[in-house]
């Protein structure tokens, strides 16, 4: 296999195989990057201008932003240990959007201020709800290809 | 913000986004057309930055948080640059789709900026 690879080095097929991220996964990463940017921007504004109003909500926003950034980086690197990081961060996001989304419906008083995950990410066109599912689907698929 | 200019930006960013996504899914690599459309979106954002700085001097002031407005504007300015950099590094059809995602992302952000500038209580 290694001999084959070194022989084939430089051909299109080989470069496609050795690139960590392929195909539609790149679009997924771009959307993750966009969401990371949105979450970071928003939590920056919240913390800079009105942190005292809702420390819990806004800390959660900041945490979510950091997790989105880490997930984006992990998806780009996507090999070995980074794969596990991607699974953990994406799983955390999915749990976050489900738990916070449900709580914000059942007891709105808990989250009086917007966070990325309130109402299942409605403020972000439900992208926070859909994206982790696509992310996990893609991670498991690319895992099978690797094996 | 100037209303007609906001609508122009929104229309250009949306059209550029849809065009790039369609051409990307059709298998086209980033071209002068799709890179040009993205560059146009970026150019309009730079003009918007100038407008946002000058408008308050003429009495056209934001009703919402300026901090939030500029966070959106600066973020929006970064988006087409990042997508275009990606398209230059990797010339595949998916880079064209990403240019499109950037265009649609900018459209949403421009609309949010308009809300912050004019409509409060949303």
Image (cartoon, coloured by chain):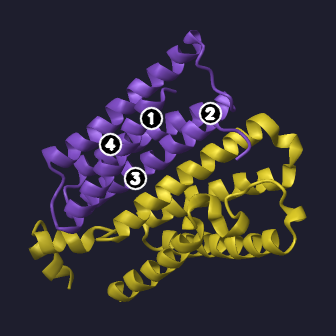
* Mark 4 nearby-residue class (10 Å; few <14, some 14–19, many ≥20): many
What secondary structure is found at the residue carrying circle 1? helix
* Numbered badge on residue B12: 4
Residues at marks 1 and 2, CA–CA distance in whole angstroms:
12 Å
Looking at the rendered structure, whether the residues under marks 1 and 4 are on a common chain is answered as yes
Of labels 2 and 3, earlier in sequence is 3
- Which chain is disc 4 placed on? B
Colour chain A appears in? yellow
Q: Is the C-beta separation of discs 4 and 3 under 8 Å? A: no
Q: Quadrant of the N terminus of chain A?
A: bottom left
For the point 14% across and 49% down, which residue is it? B31
Between residue A73 and residue B28, name the one nearer to us. B28
Between residue B52 and residue A131, name the one nearer to us. B52
Q: Where is residue A75 in the image (x, y as percent from the top left)?
A: 46, 66
Q: Where is residue B59 in the image (x, y as percent from the top left)?
A: 60, 13
Residues at marks 2 and 3, CA–CA distance in whole angstroms:
21 Å
Q: Residue furthest front?
A: B4
* Numbered badge on residue B104: 3
* Mark 3 nearby-residue class (10 Å; few <14, some 14–19, many ≥20): many
Looking at the rendered structure, whether the residues under marks 2 and 4 are on a common chain is answered as yes
Residues at marks 1 and 4, CA–CA distance in whole angstroms:
10 Å
Residues at marks 2 and 4, CA–CA distance in whole angstroms:
21 Å
- Which chain is disc 3 placed on? B
**What residue is disc 2 on?**
B118
- Which chain is disc 2 placed on? B
């Amino acid at each position: 296999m290694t001999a084959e690879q070194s022989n084939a080095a430089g051909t299109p097929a080989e470069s496609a195989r050795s690139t960590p991220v392929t195909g539609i996964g790149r679009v997924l990463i771009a959307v993750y990057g966009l969401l990371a940017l949105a979450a970071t921007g928003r939590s920056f504004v919240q913390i800079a201008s009105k942190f005292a109003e809702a420390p819990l909500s806004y800390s959660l926003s900041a945490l979510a932003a950091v997790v989105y950034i880490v997930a984006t980086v992990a998806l780009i690197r996507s090999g070995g240990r980074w794969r596990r990081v991607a699974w953990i961060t994406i799983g955390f996001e999915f749990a976050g959007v489900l738990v916070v989304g449900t709580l914000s419906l059942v007891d709105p008083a808990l989250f009086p201020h917007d966070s990325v995950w309130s109402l299942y990410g409605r403020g972000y066109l439900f992208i926070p709800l859909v994206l982790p599912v696509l992310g996990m689907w893609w991670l498991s698929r690319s895992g099978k290809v690797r094996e | 913000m100037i209303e007609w200019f906001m609508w122009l930006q929104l229309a250009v960013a949306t059209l550029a986004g849809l065009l790039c996504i369609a051409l990307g899914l059709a298998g086209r690599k980033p071209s002068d057309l799709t890179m040009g459309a993205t560059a146009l979106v970026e150019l309009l954002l730079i003009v918007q930055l100038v407008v946002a700085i000058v408008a308050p001097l003429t009495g056209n002031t934001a009703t919402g948080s300026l901090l939030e407005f500029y966070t959106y504007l600066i973020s929006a300015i970064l988006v087409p640059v990042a997508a275009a950099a990606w398209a230059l590094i990797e010339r595949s059809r998916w880079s064209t789709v990403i240019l499109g995602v950037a265009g649609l992302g900018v459209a949403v952000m421009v609309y949010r900026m308009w809300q912050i500038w004019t409509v409060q209580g949303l």
